[in-house]
Image (cartoon, rainbow, N blue to C red):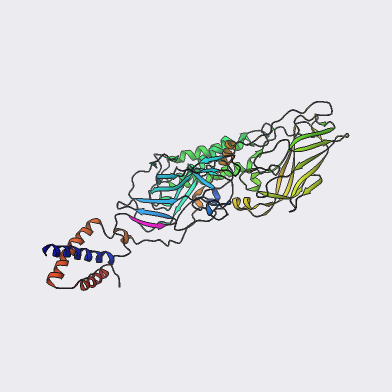
């Protein structure tokens, strides 16, 4: 009997204790508090020099190929309520965010002074181009991060992305924006980012890096991430660009600038590096903007090389010998004119059509020296179709059932050449294909300037000599990566858009209202209260339940 009474007493105490917990419904009493928040990892549109103005979200699974069951569109919109935020008892903020996109894949991430990468989970899938030409084993599918501040904006300057549609690596800085609830500032441990895994996660360490009010919410401290992103971009551009007096010593597929333009960029870069030790956020922001502006002028000054390009006005120009020849003929758009990631060649039927093709055209030289050339236009419809070509003397053209040009015959007249490569300028009306539109965000119809190029290697001249052999310059994957990296830059400070209206604001009292110690004290009080009410007041359990709820509703301000 005594044992049964003891059991009933314990049961009653547990019951009463459960009542007090239920009275605090909506307020977590755990040491750690977890919330659903909005977090987006993306390439800002103003920073995306491959696809200018297009913001691409790696946290959005949508992709042009519809892989993974996602919509067959570009990931150009943010996602909501997609991440878990945990606030530990000591104030540490942990963010767990899925990286969903299976086409715009994340390979490594780092270089953020106010975030520590705790874990970057990778899968074991193979991510390859549609033709299998290039691939990567696995991608980062989930990030666990420790946020050092409540700024809600975190810039990662050391990243590698692999867009399977292009088959080359990007090194574009990424921005993470988080819609943080109203929580206390985390305790500051260390300003150096670190990683506890071996998943190819780049990390950044800089003794001088810390946080500042404008970017991190901590007064008096400075954030250098945007400046570092601009510096890295400029350094890549300098390595990828040739200095030349007139471009005559630079291959047509390469870019060149004058020594003056290069010196201006290097001078601005040198100044920017000295600011990395500045204690003023305003000075850092100003120098970031200055370097970005100088780099923009540098980009405008870049020109295509002219090496091997024939000049018909040269005293050494010669007519070609009568006959038929198989030559290489290419027509392409400059990426600076199109806003596309690489130079699209309408004579190339592979994807992406970033390189010239060889031995694709037939050149005919008549007895009087007049020349015609037949060139197939074979770019894939999903990229674009060519509707009209201006600036060339077209003798004939063929179209397919949809009205797109499939072949042209160009009348070059009596062509006199002094060099193997002949270039002319023209323009073309094109319709963007669905795939290219979804990638780039561009409209369907465009008119772009184009380069028409003939490679006359081994073609005979009238004096019986062969024109020197000139190899086509192909852009390798590494060179394409470097070229794209050199086009990435800019100040990310202006991208201050809000991700959401703050639906997940949490009352501070709801987080810190009950500590583990106070729960123990309440439990002891309840235990005494239980015996008082049961043994002395002779109250029933239902009466106790109602009384407790009324009392604690009054304590926490409920009506």
**Residue 419 relative to residue 277: left or right:** right
Q: Tell me which residue sits at (49%, 54%) in the image.
A: 496
**Quarter in which the C terminus is drawn:** bottom left
| Magenta-span inclusion, residue 98 | no
**Quarter in which the N terminus is drawn:** bottom left
Number of numbered callouts drawn: 0
**Residue 149 relative to residue 546: left or right:** right
Front-most of residues 191 and 56: 56
Question: Where residue 172 appears, x then y in whole percent?
Answer: 52, 44
**Residue 117 relative to residue 349: left or right:** left
- Hey, which residue is sitting farthest front in the picture? 1
Q: Which residues are magenta?
A: 27-38
Question: Where residue 310 appears, x then y in whole percent?
Answer: 75, 34
Q: Classify 537 as above or below 404.
A: below
Question: Where residue 338 appears, x then y in whole percent?
Answer: 65, 48
- Hey, which residue is sitting farthest right in the picture? 368
Q: Tell me which residue sits at (75%, 53%) in the image.
A: 401
Front-most of residues 131 and 423: 131
Instruction: Kindly indicate the quadrant of the structure image that contains residue 111.
Output: top left
Residue 263 at least partly seen: no
Question: Where residue 406 appears, x then y in whole percent?
Answer: 75, 47
Instruction: Kindly indicate the quadrant of the structure image that contains residue 317.
Output: top right
| Magenta-span inclusion, residue 31 | yes
Residue 500 at least partly seen: yes
């Amino acid at each position: 009997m005594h044992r049964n009474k003891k059991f009933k007493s314990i049961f009653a105490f547990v019951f009463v204790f459960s009542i007090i917990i239920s009275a605090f419904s909506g307020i977590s009493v755990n040491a750690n508090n977890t919330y659903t928040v909005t977090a987006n990892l993306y390439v800002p549109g103003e920073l995306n020099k491959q696809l200018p103005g297009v913001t691409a979200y790696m946290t959005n699974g949508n992709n042009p190929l519809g892989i993974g069951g996602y919509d067959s569109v570009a990931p150009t919109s943010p996602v909501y309520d997609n991440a878990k935020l945990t606030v530990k008892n000591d104030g540490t903020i942990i963010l767990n965010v899925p990286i969903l996109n299976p086409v715009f894949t994340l390979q490594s991430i780092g270089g953020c002074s106010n975030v520590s990468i705790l874990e970057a989970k990778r899968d074991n899938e193979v991510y390859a181009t549609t033709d299998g030409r290039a691939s990567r084993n696995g991608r980062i599918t989930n990030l666990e991060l420790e946020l050092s501040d409540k700024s809600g904006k975190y810039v990662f300057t050391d990243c590698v992305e692999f867009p399977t549609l292009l088959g080359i690596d990007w090194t574009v800085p990424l921005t993470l924006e988080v819609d943080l609830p109203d929580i206390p500032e985390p305790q500051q441990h260390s300003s150096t980012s670190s990683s506890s895994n071996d998943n190819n996660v780049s990390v950044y360490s800089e003794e001088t890096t810390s946080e500042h009010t404008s970017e991190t919410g901590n007064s008096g401290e400075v954030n250098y991430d945007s400046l570092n992103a601009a510096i890295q971009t400029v350094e890549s551009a300098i390595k990828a660009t040739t200095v030349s007096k007139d471009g005559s010593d630079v291959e047509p597929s390469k870019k060149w600038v004058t020594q003056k333009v290069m010196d201006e960029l290097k001078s601005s870069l040198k100044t920017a590096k000295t600011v990395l030790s500045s204690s003023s956020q305003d000075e850092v922001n100003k120098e970031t903007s200055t370097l970005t502006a100088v780099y923009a002028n540098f980009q405008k000054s870049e020109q295509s090389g002219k090496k091997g390009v024939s000049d018909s006005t040269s005293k050494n120009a010669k007519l070609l010998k009568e006959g038929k020849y198989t030559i290489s003929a290419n027509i392409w758009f400059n990426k600076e004119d199109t806003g596309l990631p690489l130079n699209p060649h309408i004579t190339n039927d592979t994807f992406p059509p970033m390189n010239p093709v060889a031995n694709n055209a037939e050149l005919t030289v008549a007895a009087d020296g007049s020349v015609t050339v037949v060139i197939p236009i074979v770019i894939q419809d999903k990229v674009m179709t060519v509707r009209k070509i201006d600036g060339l003397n077209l003798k004939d053209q063929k179209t397919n059932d949809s009205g797109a040009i499939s072949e042209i015959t160009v009348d070059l007249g009596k062509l006199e050449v002094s060099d193997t490569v002949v270039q002319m300028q023209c323009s073309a009306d094109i319709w963007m294909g669905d795939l290219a539109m979804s990638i780039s965000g561009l409209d369907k119809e465009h008119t772009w300037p184009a380069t028409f190029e003939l490679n006359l290697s081994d073609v005979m001249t009238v004096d019986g000599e062969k024109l020197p052999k000139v190899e086509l310059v192909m852009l390798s994957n590494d060179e394409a990566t470097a070229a794209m990296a050199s086009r990435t830059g800019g100040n990310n400070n202006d991208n201050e858009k809000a991700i959401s209206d703050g639906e997940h604001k949490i009352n501070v009292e709801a987080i810190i209202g009950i500590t583990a110690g106070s729960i123990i004290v309440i439990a002891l009080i309840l235990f005494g209260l239980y015996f008082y009410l049961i043994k002395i007041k002779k109250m029933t359990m239902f009466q106790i339940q109602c009384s407790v709820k009324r009392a604690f509703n009054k304590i926490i301000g409920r009506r």
